Amino acid sequence: MSDKTILVVDDEPNSLFVTSQLLIDQSYQVVTADNGRKALDTLRNEKINAVITDERMPGMSGMEVLRETKKYDARIPVIILTGYGTIPLTINALKAGAFYFFEKPVSQNLDKFYAVIEEALRFQESEGDKSDTLKDSDQALSVNAIIGKSRQMLEVFEVIKRVAPTDKTVLIQGDSGSGKELIAKAIHNNSLRKDKKLVTVNCAALTDTLLTTELFGHSKGAFTGAMESNVGRFELAHGGTLFLDEIGETSPLLQKTLLRVLQEKEFERVGSGKTIKVDVRIICSTNRDLKEEVKNGAFREDLYYRLSVVPITIPPLRERKSDIPLLIDHCIKKYDDNSKPVTMLPEVTEHLEKYGWPGNVRELENVVQQMIVFCKNKTITMADIPPHILMNDARIKEMNAENLTLPMVIEEMEKEYIMQALEKTSWHRENTARLLGITRKMLGDRMSKYGLRKESKNEPL
């Protein structure tokens, strides 16, 4: 029996049973939930290594389960199942951090399904156990470990080197998936506090009440169910660094409390009148424009200036495309665990450089992992590029200029992707269908629809 536990979420009983049984047959431990709320409760109460969720469910959709899972623990891979996959839905899922987007029924392509699961579990294992949220200094990341050679990233490196040895408060700003946590780790591990703990709190993942007790702890009997005292993250970080991830999600009331703690360097546990003094360096991050939030009255101006003593802005990947080849090479080395190394054809790298990467480094990492899993002969070719990336931004703009509708754009993307697969398999229909993860009949129907036919008498049947 595998020690890996997979959470399966589906509101349809038959589908839930079939997916679970397929996993049990492969010796995985399986827990199930018939709706999104139950799934999130399970995540909080059990150690889960991966989540497989149906997309279309009443109440909470699979996309919502994905987003909430990532808020709870970004290292848990989420595979989304759907019976009506579309390119826009796939793009949104990848941008939100989905590990893979799989069309139902999974029983029609079991080898691919099992391969995706194995790769997802390897990814989760490489990211470390989800309960280990407090990173010790022996897992240090230096500035040199952050991938980048672009002018923008070199400027970020310089700021890190200058601010790390100080105790100045740092505000890291950047889009989701751009690597804000990595910057925070680099600052801590190049600081004078590197021998103490870096404690991370995801402010977006908790309600106001839960975040208050998470930060400051509580005394025994402070509220119903508080059977014993609990040490908060400020205390845990004493002498070290506290990283407040997504600080822009906090409420005005909690912002006021944080301001007082930063000014006085002391606080009280919930339900206790005893004052606790702490020596903590604060690093914050946000994907919001906090200056605009201040103007709109959603964020306290006094707290903003106290947090942003040293601001660092991480450029989105689309603005530092010279870093993409380095990042690709890093991802291949990180996720290719076989003896024979995976190689990527130059035209694939060139195409990936042209893509806009709305999901930033996180999206690039997911895409490279997928291509590693499904490439043949350890070589990543154009046929391995996901459809939404195969159709680059320039081509989409060109098509939009022709006043094409969204269905027409999607059809064009599908046609090009099928053509790439046909050329990769030398127009062998059975092999092409297997590569695309569809039936031979479905392939034949699409070839007829798009008029795809090799002009040769020797076309394989």
Image (cartoon, rainbow, N blue to C red):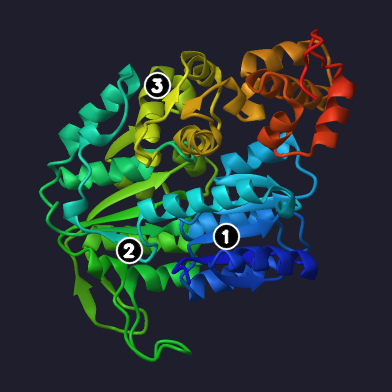
Residue 435 visible in the snapshot: yes
Indicate which label's residue lies in the foreground, 3 or 2.
Answer: 3
Disc 1 marks a residue whose amino acid type is: Val
Q: Quadrant of residue 271?
A: bottom left
- Give the camera-side residue of 347 and 395: 347
Q: Are marks 3 and 1 in contact (CB under 8 Å)?
A: no
Residue lying at 50% horizontally and 72% vertically, measured from the top left: 44
Residue 395 pos. (x, y %): 68, 13
The Cα atoms of the two marked residues, 2 and 1, are separated by 19 Å
The three-letter amino acid code for the residue at tag 3 is Pro
**Marker disc for residue 276:** none
Q: CA distance from mark 3 to mark 2?
A: 31 Å
Mark closer to the chain start, 3 or 1: 1
Quarter of the picture containing the C terminus is: top right
Amino acid type, label 2: Asp
Q: Give coordinates of residue 411: x percent, y percent.
A: 81, 25
Q: Which residue is mark 1?
A: 51
Which residue is pictured at 33% across the width and 71% down the height?
A: 216
Residue closest to the eye, 312 or 272 = 312
Secondary structure type for disc 3: helix
**Quick one: label 2, few (<14), some, or many (20+) residues within 10 Å?**
few
State the mark number for residue 132: 2
From the top left corner, tell me how far across and down residue 379 is, in percent: 48, 25
Tell me the residue that label 3 is attached to: 325
Q: Nearer the viewer, residue 443 or 458?
A: 458
* Residue 201 appears left or right of 96: left
Mark 2 or 1: in front is: 1
Is any part of residue 313 visible from this angle?
Answer: no
Q: Could you tell whether 117 is left or right of 105 in the image?
A: left
Residue 328 spot, x, y in % from top left:
41, 28
Q: Pointer 2 and pointer 1: residues touching (CB < 8 Å)? A: no
